[in-house]
Structures are given as C-alpha cells and as structure tokens.
Image (cartoon, rainbow, N blue to C red):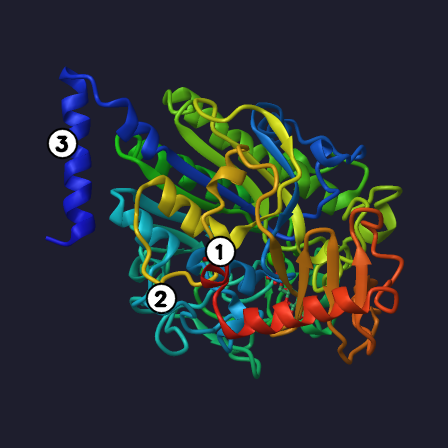
C-alpha cells in the first residue's frame, strides 16, 4: 500500500472513530480542508474589498471581512502558466524551460516524479481535486483528445480532475474529466492544430457574421459557440463547451467534489475561467455592471465563490476549512476580443494604484488580491506581510507536518505564520517574473527591474511592460506606482539587489533562507 493510501485509510478510520469517540483536536486542526480559488487575470483593483467601486463582490468581500486581506501578496509570474507551475511545484517556473504561456496542445509540463502541492497533501492524507482551468499541458506528447489523456493532474498527485485543458480562448473547447474528454462521440473525433486549419470548420476570418464579438488575428481561428479561438479544431461537436455555462458547470463540479469528500480532509484547487477572455458570462450576470463583459465576469467570479462558501456552510465545514482566494496574474483589458473592456471601464482602476498589468514587470503584473479565511484559527485582519503563492507548498507542508527534502519545492518557504496572520513581515524578498526568464526583485521597500530590451509599451494591450535598457529601482514604500526611478541615487542598493537576484538564480530560495 502506498504511503498516501495508507494515510488516507487511517483518516477514514479516524473519521469512523469520530462517531463514537472524541477525535483529538490537534489532528483535526492540523489537517483543515483547503480550498484554493484561483481567478484568472483578476487585478489588484478589481474587487470591491480592494477599492473597486464600479463592481460589487460581496462573497469575495466576506473573505476579507472574516479572514485576512493581504496588501502585498504576489503570484510568481505575470502570466498564467508560469504562475500555476510555481504554485503547484514550489519551484520558480523560470528555472524550467518551456513553462511560458503553454500552447493548447502542450504536453504535461510538471514532471510526474517530483513533489507537488497535491502530492504532498496526498501524503498527509488529503483527497485532492482540481476543477477548472489547467493550462499546464497534458499527455506525454501532443495529447490525443480521442483516447486516454495522460499524464495529467492525476499523475502529479490529484485524485480528481475536471479541466478546461488550456484557456477559454484556445482550442480544444472541451472539458476533460480525469483522463477523458467529457461527452465525446467516438464517431466524431477531435482534431486540433495550431498550424493550419483542419477540416472545414468556420473561422473568424471566413465567417465573421457568426461571431458574438470580433477577435484579433491570433483569436480568429476556429469558431466554437460563436467565439473564434486561438487554434483550429474539428470534430467533438457533442463535447463542445458553452461559454455562457462554464462558470455554472465548473462550480457544480467543485461543489460535488466538496460534498463527496466532506468526511476526509480535502484540498480543492478551484481554478476559475473568469475573468480571462473570452468574457461571455451567463445571461444572469449580463448587465450587472456598467463595465460590460469584463465587469460582469467579475460578478460571475464572485458568484462562484459564493457557491463554494454556501456548500461549506451547508456541510458544516466552514469553521475548519481554509479558503484562499487569489489570482494568477495581473489585469488586462483588451486581451484579444472586442468586448469593450477598455471603453467601458470608466474610472475603474484594474490594478488599483499599481503600474502595469498582465505581462508587465511593474507591480501590476504580479501583485494580486489574496484573501485567506479560516474561521476556527485565523482572526480577521489586514496584513502588509510579503507573501508569495510559491510558498503555499512549504507552508501547507508545515501545517500538515510533512517534511520536504532539499530537492522538493526548492523555492518554497514556510511562510505559514504570515499566511495565518501571525507574522506581519513575511518573506524578505519576492521574485517577480514578467516574460519567460525575465525576473525582477522586491526586497523590503525596494523594487528592482533589471535592464532589458523590448518595447516599453505593449501597444495592443495598452500595458506598460516595464522594460527599459537602464536598470530601475523604486522605493515602493513611498512610490507604489513606480514612477520615480532612483537607481542613480542608490547605487549600493542596486548592487545588492543585482547580487541577490544572481544568487537566487544559482540556488533555491529555501536554501538561501536557511
Ligand atoms: C496570449 C494570448 C492572450 C492570452 C494569453 C494567455 C495572443 C496575441 N494573446 O498568447 O489572449 O490567451 O496568451 O493568458 O495570442 S494567460 O492568462 O493564460 O497567461
Ligand atoms: Ca492568467
């Protein structure tokens, strides 16, 4: 029997004994359920609890009211795949080639023989599920969508998966449950290509009249459900998702997972599609804001959070469940479709006071909302501690008394005290990845952006990239908007930051700390 199965069977025994005897308090509080709700492209200024006024997010705000609201929390990267890679492996993605934005037919990026967040929690007796956006590749080579698709989440520690395989704007537009496409008719097999059109499916270019809204050239390939996507696909008609139903479908899968596992400790990674493009919210949310689909998608994300909080309450699990809400990277308005996000935003500040957004080296790229609620243990507070999603692995290992070897999760630090509101300082530094392998550093009050070539402005997305051929240094304590480059004024600090970044390149963050 594998260690994790053994531990799970112990957990079943202890649950059984719970009926007749008192379970020791310590073992239960050492193994709270953990639900990580991960929004997509949601910015630092996109929630009412972070200052937004043109959109209301009461369910998410309740986490801020009843838990900890972090003001200096970071995703490890300014795009999706590397952030998620780091979150699940405790290793900075820039250490591993090929972890930039994954194409829709990427093979599994996470090695199956390393410790991951779910495999570690599995060893601690947790049942682990992932529901929603994956975007970390599937299969050994390009996946064959018509057969068993593996390796995937089940091979890196999850016990259950229900996935949007890549992104909503990429083919294939189907859900994958465990190893198979959901609802696939074998007589109508799926073919996918990112090089050329396959079959004679209409595209955004050939059939613009079929579109709900126009896509840019990259998003003008095969049309599924009135939305042209990145990439071409044919077949699998009975399995196509309906964008308008996506939030409802994945929320119900997440709720089912909680209901089915309420008697053992569980870890649910609930990875929302919102508010990534294409933004096609369910009719019940259309018009809930004056900001068009992007604002309405925020309301929809808030509804998804409400579904989770409701089922936890209904099952009597709220007290001993850690609920975390966060985002994989900063915000973007126009990310490929004419959904009027830019024109309708009014005075809404997607990144709050921060500069830049998704893809950027500025704070708006990686500083994101992070809320943590654990009613039986954690007092409501606002925390300015430096926290990073790369630390979930080591922190939850500490919580569940799991030991990590030196090789495991090399950049993940036990930052549990900060996450639970007991340490107001947290990490000494944060590594911020913008594009692949391009990394910047926050340490204490300083932010260092290394010199690099490339356009200063991403014209299409209207986002400042943060690139400059000169090094940049900002005093975040007085200049959170990174307006005044003080690199010339503090050459010694600049030197220290460069040296530390070099050290981090050479060795894992955890070993640096010890
Ligand atoms: C980019 C897409 C963008 C989005 C992003 C992934 C183009 C021009 N842009 O390549 O629309 O899909 O990938 O976003 O194709 S992420 O949040 O999953 O990283
Ligand atoms: Ca994202």
What residue is pinned by disc 3? 13
Residue 37 locus on image (x, y percent): 51, 42
Quadrant holding the C terminus: bottom left
Q: Image height check: is 382 above or below 98?
A: above
Q: CA distance from mark 2 to mark 1?
A: 16 Å
State left or right for residue 448 relative to residue 436.
right
Residue 148 locus on image (x, y percent): 29, 66
Q: CA distance from mark 3 to mark 2?
A: 32 Å
Which residue is at the front of the view, 50 or 197? 50
Residue 17 locus on image (x, y percent): 14, 23
Which residue is at the front of the view, 256 or 352? 352
Residue at x 80% of width, y 63% of height: 473
Q: Is mark 3 within 8 Å of ligand 2?
A: no
Q: Which type of secondary structure does the marked residue at label 2 adopt?
A: loop
Frontmost of labels 2 and 1 is 2
What residue is pinned by disc 1? 87
Q: Image height check: is 23 above or below 281?
A: above
Residue 260 locus on image (x, y percent): 29, 34
State left or right for residue 452 relative to residue 385.
right
Ligand 1 image position (quadrant): bottom right
Residue at x 30% of width, y 35% of height: 265
What residue is pinned by disc 2? 407
């Amino acid at each position: 029997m594998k260690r994790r199965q053994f531990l799970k069977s112990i957990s079943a025994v202890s649950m059984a004994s719970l009926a007749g005897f008192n379970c020791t308090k310590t073992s239960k509080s050492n193994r709270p359920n953990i639900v990580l709700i991960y929004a997509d492209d949601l910015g630092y200024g996109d929630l009412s609890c972070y200052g937004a006024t043109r959109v209301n997010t009461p369910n998410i705000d309740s986490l801020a009211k009843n838990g900890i609201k972090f003001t200096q929390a970071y995703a490890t990267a300014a795009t999706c795949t590397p952030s998620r890679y780091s979150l699940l492996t405790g290793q900075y993605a820039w250490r591993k080639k090929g972890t930039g934005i994954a194409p829709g037919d990427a093979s599994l990026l996470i090695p199956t023989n390393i410790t991951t967040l779910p495999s570690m929690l599995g060893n601690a007796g947790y049942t682990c599920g992932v529901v929603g956006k994956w975007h970390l590749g599937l299969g050994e080579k390009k996946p064959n969508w018509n057969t068993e698709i593996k390796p995937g989440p089940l091979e890196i520690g999850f016990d259950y998966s229900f996935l949007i395989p890549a992104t909503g704007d990429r083919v294939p537009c189907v859900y994958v449950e465990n190893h198979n496409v959901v609802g696939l008719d074998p007589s109508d097999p799926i073919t996918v290509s990112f090089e050329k059109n396959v079959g004679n499916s209409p595209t955004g270019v050939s059939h613009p009249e079929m579109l709900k809204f126009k896509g840019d050239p990259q998003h003008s390939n095969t049309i599924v459900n009135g939305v042209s996507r990145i990439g071409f696909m044919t077949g699998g008609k009975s399995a196509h998702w309906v964008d308008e139903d996506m939030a409802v479908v994945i929320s119900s899968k997440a709720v089912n997972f909680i209901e089915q596992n309420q008697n053992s400790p569980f870890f649910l990674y609930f990875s929302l599609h919102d508010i990534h493009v294409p933004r096609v919210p369910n009719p019940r949310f259309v018009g809930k804001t004056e900001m068009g689909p992007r604002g309405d998608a925020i309301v929809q994300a808030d509804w998804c959070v409400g579904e989770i909080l409701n089922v936890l309450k209904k099952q009597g699990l709220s007290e001993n469940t850690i609920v975390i809400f966060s985002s994989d990277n900063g915000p973007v308005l126009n990310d490929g479709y004419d959904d009027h996000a830019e024109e309708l935003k009014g005075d809404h500040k997607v990144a709050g006071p921060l500069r830049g957004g998704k893809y950027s080296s500025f704070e708006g790229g990686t500083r994101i909302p992070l809320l943590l609620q654990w009613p039986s243990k954690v007092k409501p507070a606002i925390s300015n501690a430096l926290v990073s999603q790369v630390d979930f692995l080591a922190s939850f290992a500490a919580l569940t008394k799991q030991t990590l070897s030196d090789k495991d999760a090399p950049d993940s630090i036990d930052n549990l005290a900060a996450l639970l509101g007991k340490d107001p300082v947290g990490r000494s530094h944060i590594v911020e990845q913008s594009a692949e392998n391009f990394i910047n550093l926050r340490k204490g009050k300083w932010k260092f952006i290394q010199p690099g070539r490339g356009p200063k402005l991403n014209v299409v997305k209207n986002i400042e990239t943060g690139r400059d051929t000169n090094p940049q240094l900002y005093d975040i304590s007085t200049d959170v908007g990174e307006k005044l480059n003080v690199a010339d004024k503090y050459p010694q600090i600049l030197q220290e930051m460069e040296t530390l970044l070099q050290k981090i390149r050479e060795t894992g963050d955890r070993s640096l700390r010890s």
